[in-house]
Image: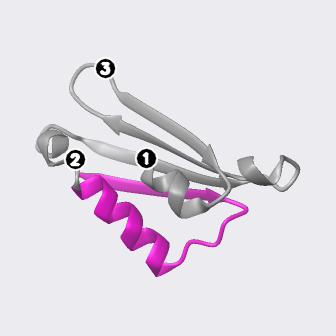
Amino acid sequence: MNLILSTHNVTLTKAIEDHIISRINKLEHLHRYAINSRVTLERDQTKAPERQFSCSMRLSLPGPDLFAEDVESDLYTAIDL
């Protein structure tokens, strides 16, 4: 499976990348069908502090893709949810 990470106003560190990979690996029941996953991390300083960080993920599978997005005050929490 290919992993595409993109960021907007967020510095991608090795710790963040490892955390994302560990969360994707928990999707083992979909892992053998997944073609690629696209993760986008964003930080928007103009929003309220409790909605600054967003994480969106799209899993490409045969058939319809799966998409999830969450907005939180902490980047790691947004990735987890």
Say which label, 1 or 3, has the lower sequence index.
1
Q: Are marks 2 and 1 in contact (CB under 8 Å)?
A: no
- Residue 17 in magenta? yes
Quarter-of-image position of residue 70: top right
Query: How many residues crowd around disc 3 within 10 Å: few (fewer than 14), some, or many (20 or more)?
Result: few
- Helix, strand or loop status at disc 1: strand
Quarter-of-image position of residue 34: top left
Q: Who's the residue at 32% across and 57% down the image?
A: 23
Kindly identify which residue carries mark 1.
38
- Helix, strand or loop status at disc 3: loop
- Residue 11 in magenta? yes
Query: How many residues crowd around disc 1 within 10 Å: few (fewer than 14), some, or many (20 or more)?
Result: some
Kindly identify which residue carries mark 2.
27
- Give the x, y percent position of residue 78: 54, 52
- Give the x, y percent position of residue 77: 52, 57
Left or right relative to 14: residue 42: right
Say which label, 3 or 2, has the lower sequence index.
2
Q: Who's the residue at 80% across and 54% down the image?
A: 49
Kindly identify which residue carries mark 3.
64
Residue type at tag 1: Arg
What segment is highlighted magenta in the picture? 1-25
- Give the x, y percent position of residue 5: 48, 58
Q: Who's the residue at 88% across and 50% down the image?
A: 46
Residue type at tag 2: Leu
